[in-house]
Structure formats: C-alpha cells, structure tokens
C-alpha cells in the first residue's frame, strides 16, 4: 500500500486503520480471517512498531478485530451487526388528523431538568465537539476581514447579506444540483430563522403543515409558535418521508399548505431520501399547489463520493424553499444560515426585514473566506472521517451494554443514532434515571406530538469517544436492563 495516497491530515495509525477497515468492509479480509501481523504491517507500510500496534488497537477498540492469545488479531463480526433496525412505519392508513402542536411544555421541561441537574455526559445534542471545527482557520479569516475592512463593525449591513458570501454559497450549491444566482440567496440567523421565514411566507395561523414523523422538535416548536397544525407523515429510517402516505394525506385533508422535509440524514432518523423519491416529492407538491420547504442542514455530513442532489435541484417553478446552515458542519457559534425562497422571495425579504433586519457582515466575510478555499473541503473530509468511527464505537457500546430487543439505526453519515428500547420502555423514565446520574439523553417523546416514539432515544456521537462516554453508555444500558426486568 502506498501510504502517500492516504489522507495526510490524519495520524498515520488512523490512516492505516481506515485502510484495513475498507478491506474488511469490502470482504477482502473475511470474518474470522487472521489480520497481517504487527511485524508484517511494519514491513509492508514502513512504519514503526508503535504505529502498527496503534492501528490494531484502534480497530480492536471499534470492534472490527479481536486479539487471540499467541495467535494475533482476527477479523470479528461487530456486535452491532446483531442489533436489528427499528421496524418500518405503517404507510397504508391515513395519518392522524392534523393538530396544534403541544411540544413546547415537553421541551421546556427537558431543558429545565437538564439545567437544574449537573450533567457530566451529554448525549442529547446534534453537533460535533468544538475541537472538530476549524477554530484557528476561522479566527484568522475573521482577523483578515477586519484588517481588510476596518470600518466593518460601524457600517450598515447590505440587504440580503454580503454579496461575496452569497456568491460562494451559490457556487457551492452547484455540487448539489442547484443553479442559483447570488441575489436569490438570503442570509439568515441559522436554519431555524430560515424555516420560520419560510413558514410565515406560505401559511397563516390555523393552517396545516405536513412534517416527517418523527421530526426535529425545534420544527414542532416553530409550528406551535406560529399557531399552525402539524400533520405527521410516516417516515422510514431507510428512505425518508413516505411519498405514498403524503399523497394519501393530500387526498384526505384539503388544507395542507406546506410540507417540511429533511432529505439527507433526517433528524432524528438519519435517513437519506433516494433521488427518485425526491423527484416524486417535488412533483407531488407542485401538482397539488403545496409549498415544499427543504431543510438541508446535514447534507455535507453524508458519506458519499458524490454530493447528493437537493430537492431544489428538481424545482422548475420556484415551489421549493431551500433552507440550510453552517451550524452543524462548520461553526456552531456563527449561527449562519441561508435560504432560497423561490416564488416567495419578495415576501421572505419583507418578512426578514420586519423580523430581524439583515445579519451582521463580519461572520459572513470570514465564512466566505474559508468556504471559498479548498480548506473547507479538507475540513469536511476530516469531520466525516472523525464522526464515522465515533458512530461505530457508540453502536458497539450500545450492542454490548443494552439488553436484547434493543434496535438501532446505522445512518450513512451524521452525528446521531436513533435507538428503540426493548419492551416499549418509556424513554422518559430512562431520561429521569439517567439524569439522576448526570447523563443527559434526548427522549423520543420530544420528536413527535404523539406518544408513538416514547420508546425511542436519539444518541449523540459528536463528542470524542472516551472512558467517560463508555461508562455513561454502560450506565444507561444498566438502567434500561433494570426497567426491562420490571416489565418482563
């Protein structure tokens, strides 16, 4: 193997571990087969004994190989392979009637409890740890922006956002199948403001909005704050929102004004919608005169050689409102988002001005500096590469520590896992017991206005795996085991 062909930004042992992991996944080294010895790795790759040992220990810690006394390392079947994914949703019956969302009190209770108890390990978030983001590069870009434009903080901000930043975003959108003019891009305070503006533009209080089920609780909070009714559409962990169920809902209910969808690494399921489904969804909404709002927050975290196309790529009439942000992929502290509002662009511009005025320009110039360079692509590769083993290690730990009957999704990218508890145990009970031990989880009841996901938990993999995280997973597994015995 030519080590120079590996990603130079990773430690050498991690590069070698990824090389052998690719061979295991491809079947080149089969389950039960002996790995090359440590000395063979040293000779083959011209590396030190320490690097070869670290490579094997990394693969062992992730559950891919096991050490056998006096025999060496052998490929093993990861424990997580024995965990089944959750069942697919039933899409043959009409969705429940649309209802005003009552999620605010539930989320407020979750936040309040999390703040009153000391939290040692937090599994509830959906972003990576600070060390996985390019802080030094962004700091230097921000300094360069102030040096280049010393009056930046005392001049007024341009309408719609900094033109260079919008141009960089439009250029990057080409990779996801979109052809945009910079003037079509409106800069927002994160994706949350973009979704707020999109819903305000296409609905009135009392209208019905179709959403994925389960869905991000922040969206449910927005709907409640705007006085909108949520219609939950069954959503698969494999292929995303059910087009058939949505079509049935449109035939059943007359007043669906919008559909909100996360097509890639849906939160919390981690599903990725196939292209054929994306095209059908765009056409279905256009045919029925229903606005389609796309939340494209996680696309850059998808494990794919070819960036997936956005729903907006199939939009021919301006019926898709595209919303995205850098919150998960580059800089949680910047709160930079953007949107392309299609035929509602003028209304969105008016609402944006009335709601928050224009965003400050400093962070946009700094972000444009980094996004316009090859450094951003290298950062995304490093981020995806760092998150992959963390998802795998977390899944291994869950498989080792949780009782039989636990189910788990393994998404093709992203920051979180979606876990189903055995015996339909209440995630709220697990939440309360875990929080007592200083462990914060995200109970499934937060991701729906109904109780149908109370037996689920969203688990964050964004923080570097450590002994504390391993201990916390074991403790939550013991809590679930104890509760399962009580109901058995």
Image (cartoon, grey):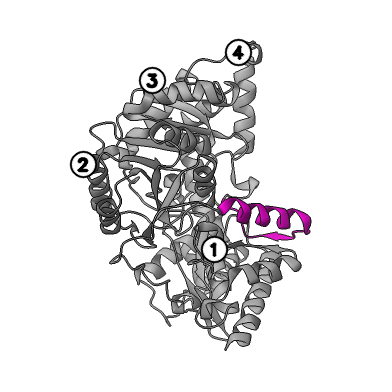
Secondary structure, mark 3, is: helix
**Nearer mark to the viewer, of 2 and 4:** 2
Left or right of residue 42: residue 95: left
Among numbered discs 2 and 1, the one appearing first in the sequence = 2
Residue 64 inside the magenta-drawn segment: no
Q: CA distance from mark 2 to mark 1?
A: 34 Å
Considering only vertical position in the picture, is 23 above or below 403?
above
Residue marked by disc 1: 444
Residue marked by disc 2: 287
Q: Which residues are magenta?
A: 103-126
Q: CA distance from mark 3 to mark 1?
A: 40 Å
Secondary structure, mark 1, is: helix
Among numbered discs 1 and 4, the one appearing first in the sequence = 4
Residue marked by disc 4: 149
Q: Is residue 60 visible?
A: no
Residue 122 inside the magenta-drawn segment: yes
């Amino acid at each position: 193997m030519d080590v120079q062909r590996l990603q130079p930004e990773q430690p050498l042992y991690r590069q070698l571990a990824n090389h052998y992991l690719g061979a295991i996944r491809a079947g080149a080294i089969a389950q039960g087969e002996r790995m090359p010895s440590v000395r063979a790795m040293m000779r083959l790759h011209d590396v030190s004994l320490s690097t070869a040992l670290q490579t094997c220990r990394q693969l062992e810690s992730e559950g891919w190989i096991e050490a056998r006394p006096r025999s060496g390392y052998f490929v093993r079947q990861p424990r997580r392979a024995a965990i089944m994914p959750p069942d697919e949703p039933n899409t043959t019956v009409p969705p429940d009637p649309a209802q005003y969302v009552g999620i605010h009190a539930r989320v407020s209770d979750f936040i309040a409890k999390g703040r009153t108890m000391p939290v040692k390990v937090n599994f509830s978030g959906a972003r990576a740890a600070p060390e996985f983001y390019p802080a030094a590069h962004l700091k230097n870009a921000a300094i360069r922006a102030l040096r280049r434009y010393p009056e930046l903080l005392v001049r007024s901000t341009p309408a719609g956002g900094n033109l260079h930043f919008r141009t960089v975003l439009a250029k990057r959108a080409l990779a996801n199948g979109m052809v945009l003019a910079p003037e079509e891009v409106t800069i927002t305070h994160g994706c949350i403001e973009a979704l707020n503006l999109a819903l305000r533009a296409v609905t009135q209080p009392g209208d019905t909005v179709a959403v994925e089920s389960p869905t991000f609780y922040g969206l449910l909070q927005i709907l409640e704050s705007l006085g909108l009714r949520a219609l939950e559409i069954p959503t698969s962990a494999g292929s995303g929102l059910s087009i058939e169920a949505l079509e049935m809902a449109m035939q059943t209910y007359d007043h669906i004004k919008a559909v909100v969808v996360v097509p890639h690494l849906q939160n919390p399921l981690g599903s990725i919608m196939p292209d054929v489904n994306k095209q059908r969804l765009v056409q279905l909404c256009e045919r029925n005169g229903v606005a389609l709002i796309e939340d494209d927050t996680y696309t850059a975290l998808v494990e794919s050689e070819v960036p997936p196309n956005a729903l907006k790529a199939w939009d021919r009439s301006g019926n898709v409102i595209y919303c995205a942000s850098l919150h998960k992929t580059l800089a949680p502290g910047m709160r930079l988002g953007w949107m392309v509002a299609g035929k509602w662009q003028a209304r969105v511009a008016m609402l944006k001005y009335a709601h928050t005025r224009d965003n400050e320009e400093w962070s946009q110039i700094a972000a444009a500096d980094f996004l316009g360079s090859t450094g951003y692509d290298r950062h995304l590769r490093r981020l995806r590469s760092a998150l992959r083993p963390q998802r795998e290690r977390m899944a291994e730990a869950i498989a080792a520590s949780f009782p039989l009957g636990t189910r788990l999704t393994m998404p093709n990218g992203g920051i979180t896992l979606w876990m189903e508890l055995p015996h339909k145990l209440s995630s709220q009970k697990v939440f309360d017991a875990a929080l007592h031990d200083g462990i914060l989880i995200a109970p499934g009841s937060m991701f729906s206005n109904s109780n149908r996901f109370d037996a689920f938990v969203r688990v964050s993999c964004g923080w570097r795996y450590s002994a504390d995280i391993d201990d916390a997973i074991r403790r939550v597994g013991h809590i679930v085991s104890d509760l399962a015995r009580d109901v058995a």
